[in-house]
Image (cartoon, rainbow, N blue to C red):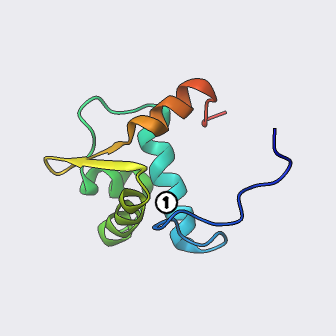
Amino acid sequence: MHLHRIAGRPDGVARPGTAEFDHQRRLLLELAVDPPVGGESVAELASTLDLAAAQVEAAAAGLERAGLLVRRAGRLFAAPAVLAVEALWPLGL
């Protein structure tokens, strides 16, 4: 196992220590730890996360660019790879 983290960030992932980074982390955890079967809308997630819809939309756009989030019919889902990581190494612990 490597003793260091990868130096770069995937395109779309916000810089650590910023509010945008926190929004992305919270959004991804919400979608990955107990994934909603039918996904969730931006409005539902904004309410759950106590964020403005624009903040959720911005976080979702970055996660989508990074390949961590999928949109289908106006609903947001964690990407299959994220769900696989959650199954192998639970993120919510």
Q: What residue appears at the point 42 percent right and 58 percent down from the top-left corner? A: 63
**Taking 74 as reference, is 7 left or right?**
right
**Taking 21 as reference, is 50 left or right?**
left
Q: What residue appears at the point 82 percent right and 54 percent down from the top-left corner? A: 4
Q: Residue 26's x, y, as percent?
A: 51, 53
Question: Quadrant location of residue 7?
Answer: bottom right
- Observer-nearest of 13 and 55: 13
* Total number of numbered discs in the rendering: 1
Q: Residue 40's x, y, as percent?
A: 27, 44
- Observer-nearest of 54 and 69: 69
- In the rendered image, the vertical position of residue 35 relative to residue 6, given as above or below: above
Q: Residue 58's x, y, as percent?
A: 36, 70
Identity of the residue furthest to the left in this view: 73
Q: Residue 47's x, y, as percent?
A: 34, 55
- In the rendered image, the vertical position of residue 46 relative to residue 76, given as above or below: below
The C terminus - image quarter: top right
**Taking 43 as reference, is 55 left or right?**
right
Q: What residue appears at the point 37 percent right and 49 percent down from the top-left corner? A: 69
The N terminus - image quarter: top right
Q: Amino acid at mark 1?
A: Gln
- In the rendered image, the vertical position of residue 28 relative to residue 66, given as above or below: above
Identity of the residue furthest to the right in this view: 3
Mark 1 secondary-structure assignment? helix
- Observer-nearest of 50 and 82: 82
Q: Which residue is mark 1?
A: 24
